[in-house]
Image (cartoon, grey):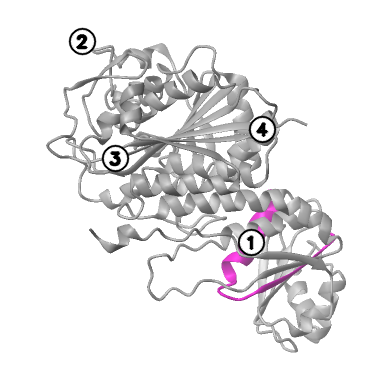
Amino acid sequence: MNDIIEKASPMTTPTSVTFANTDIDRFAQASGRVAILVGTEGQLDISGRRVNRLTKGALKRAIEAKVDAGLKPGAVFTLAYPTGMEAEAVDVICLPRSASAQKARAAGAQVGKKRGKSEILMALGNSKWAADVTLGVVLRDYQFQDHKTDAEPRTGAIEVMCNDPDAVSAAAAPLLAVAEGTFFTRDLVNEPANVLTTTTFAERLAAMESIGLKVEVLEEDDLAELGMRTLLAVGQGSASPSKVVVMQWNGGEEGAAPLALVGKGVVFDTGGISLKPAAGMEDMTMDMGGAGTVAGVMRAVALRKARANVVGIVGLVENMPSGTAIRPGDVVTSMKGDTVEILNTDAEGRLVLCDALWYAQERFAPAAMVDLATLTGAIIIGLGHENAGVFSNDDAFCNAFLKAAAAENEGAWRMPLGQAYDDLLKSPIADMKNIGGRPAGSITAAQFLQRFVKDDVPWIHLDIAGVASVKTETPLAPKGATGWGVRALDRLVADRYETD
């Protein structure tokens, strides 16, 4: 066995952040990067004035030049190797009090991107956005270097100086918990499939019992007894055992129905017998992105001790071609009891999710349910890499999620459902087919899933194929895994399900 399989990579955690009272004498000795705030008119607070004196007026002259050119909220510019200071650079953040939280996070992310391995000393004064600037720095500071032999991880700390460090620290604490959940998701999605097997994935989730989650791992015998034959069918061609992991956070009212999050966790997807083209198949290590996001949200709500009941259920499988693999033309029976004619073994994610969705409803009777999956290439054709596809049977629930996603600047766009699309799934020999043809492929996939949602359960399906992992950097993440959805779903929990 490849040695790397035996080594579980360490989890990436956000860089240490400390909060302290403003100390203007610290700027003279700062050796890394210094970040200060100015308004759109270039106004300097006491920290900025101290830095300006140290640089013999160079900072003010640079700011005046930028103001004359039109300094915009959220802009960041750098004074490199400033005269009179030990610091390697001064990052100037233009952030008036009227700026939005998203502008503050994006500005902080620019500082995080620039820092390299250096420490950062941020002077945020009395900015109401101090916690959000800090979150932006941390999110963009992410690196995945577990498999680089010459990696030099960032070790420099982030120190935030402000007028009320206790208040800013308290405001930042839940945001940093969400950052850790986002990092957890990014790590999972970035891992190669020979490291993140179904077994290793389950072990990493089980380890979250240490932060207060209740975690159960259902093995193949358990799944067979439950009747999860569509999920088991996907993994039957692989040597990696199929599993379902159940994570519970019970921070709300005792006995209150939970929000259920259900994720597709295909650790590698060859397409099975309906083999994918070789070009680009290496990207299918991210086909467990839905399960990765569910895991990240569960980590976030546990770390910030959310006053809500949330359950996360992920189906972990590997889709491989072999003598035991499911074939096109086979018919399998779901946990619900409906039969499915398999026309394409590469439409496997819906087979994993349909059993997991039914299990979630039968066991937990959730107040509402969200599933996430890198489900279809069709959603990328429709929405590119800017938005996830959102499908729902409940307008109020859907609107609450869209509001949360907009507040977190995570792109999401509602797509239609309807009987005409559902009719495309009719099969002559079974209750349904697993595909509806090329037209409206992401919609017919959602219609397939809706068949496994009870009429009285508010439900959202998120097709995250275009946003889970991207080839270019985003404002808050380097290229690769984005952690999309952790922030939006955590906000949905906070806004809609937390008790007072």
* Image position of 456 with respect to 227: above or below: above
Q: Nearer the viewer, mark 3 or mark 1?
A: 3
In the rendered structure, which amino acid carries the disc numbered 1? Val
The residue that mark 2 highlights is 428
Please state which of the two labelled residues, at mark 1 or mark 4, is closer to the viewer: 4
Instruction: Using the image, determine if residue 347 lies above or below residue 132.
Output: above
The residues bearing labels 2 and 3 have C-alpha atoms spaced at a distance of: 32 Å
The residue at which mark 3 appears reads as 241
Q: How busy is the neighbourhood of tag 3: few (under 14 within 10 Å), some, or many (20 plus)?
A: some
Depth check, mark 2 against mark 4: the one in front is 4
Between 100 and 181, the one nearer to me in the picture: 181
- Residue that carries the numbered disc 4 in the rendered image: 308
Residue bearing mark 1: 137
Q: Earlier in the sequence, mark 1 or mark 4?
A: 1
SS of the residue under disc 1:
helix
Viewed as shown, does residue 355 lie left or right of 431?
right
156 lies above or below 273: below
Q: Residue at x 63, y 21 (%)?
A: 396
As measured in the structure, the alpha-carbon distance from the residue carrying label 3 to the one carrying label 1 is 39 Å
Q: Earlier in the sequence, mark 1 or mark 2?
A: 1
Whole-Å distance between the Cαs marked 1 and 2? 56 Å
State left or right for residue 203 relative to residue 460.
left
Task: Assign a secondary structure to mark 3.
Answer: loop
Find the distance from the CA under tag 4 to the CA under tag 3.
32 Å
